[in-house]
Image (cartoon, rainbow, N blue to C red):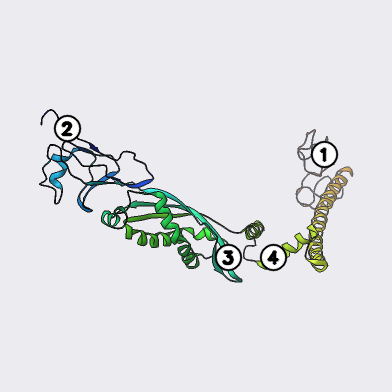
Amino acid sequence: MGLFGNQFANVVEWEEYRDDILFWKWSNQEIKKGSRLIIRPGQDAIFLYNGKVEGIFTDEGSFDIESEIIPFLSTLKGFKFGFNSGIRAEVLFINTKEVTVKWGTKNPINIPAQGLPAGMPVRAFGTFCCKISDHAALIDKVAGIKRQFTVDDVQERVISMLDQLLMKWIVKEGKDMFNLQANSFDIGKGIQEDLDMEMMKIGISITTFNIASFTYPEEIQKMVTKAASQSVVGDMGRYQQMAMIDAMANGNGGGRAASDMAGMAMGMMMGQQMAGQMSQTMFGNGQQAQASQAAASASENASAGGWKFCPECGTKTEGMKFCPNCGQKQEAANVCPACGQKVQPGAKFCANCGQKL
């Protein structure tokens, strides 16, 4: 090859690779004899000569251009390098990785909504993923006039179409205008399909489109939040009642009539609560009275020196020593004078209430 055979050789590579760049074009100078092509992981290299594709190389590694690249080109496969002459070609490096891009509406989108002539103003935010999928379309539409194409370029194109697509798919898939997030998957899927169809015209595929959140004007958001906290979403009648009570409490708006109505409603609710409490109290007192009466009866039964009723079968005994019905011996010591419960013979304390016997 001679002493100076490689003095003009150069390295063809993506010099400053970045994840946010979808393609970058090497177009420094002539490719000299002895030059090498370096393809890193996640890259493809496309040889261009006079604006036309000569060859596409997808294997990563370092290649001698004269022996490993030139033979696989189209019109240049028979090219022979001279001592100081080379090929004036371009090499387009493609980022083959899927790239995630953030998106957001610049201005609120007025979505048609019942009762709102101007529409419901809505903002939306999220992410989408894209990748280069058609080299020929990319070169024909973009790479022929640009040295590089970045994520910002893709974002600008997507956002320019986004308002109309959001309006289209929110109207089509948004079941509840105040809870669009519930249908965000279906809305995003529809937008992804439409965007993919449009971006494929320049060789870029939109693989996913995610909607992270929908936001409403502050006034509407407050109304939705308050309604949700009271579990009355969709029940405007109950929401109006709640608003009237708020107006009375805050002393603004609603007028005297609204305050009076709210006061009456609150009074009725309080009356119902008081009636319920009184009923519970009376019921509780009745139970306590029955228990006290039973205990008093038992105590009286025991204090009389004998049983008035047999503790086994309940037959009236009137001080008899034995029950005339079952023959059970009637002893006052077998009953607690405090609670009337039967106790074991010889027990010093009642097992039910702890009374000393």
Residue at 80%, 49% in the rendered image: 310
**Disc number lying in front (3 or 2):** 2
How many neighbours does mark 3 have within 10 angstroms: few (below 14), some (14-19), or many (20 or more)? Answer: many
Please provide percent x and percent y for residue 286: 82, 55
Please provide percent x and percent y for residue 63: 19, 38
**Disc number lying in front (3 or 4):** 3
Residue at 52%, 58% in the rendered image: 181
Between discs 3 and 1, the one toward the N terminus: 3
How many neighbours does mark 2 have within 10 angstroms: few (below 14), some (14-19), or many (20 or more)? Answer: some
Q: Is residue 43 left or right of residue 271?
A: left
Element class at badge 4: helix
Residue where numbered disc 4 is placed: 238
Report which quarter residue 249 is drawn in.
Answer: bottom right
Q: Nearer the viewer, residue 105 or 343?
A: 105
Residue where numbered disc 3 is placed: 120
**Disc number lying in front (4 or 1):** 4
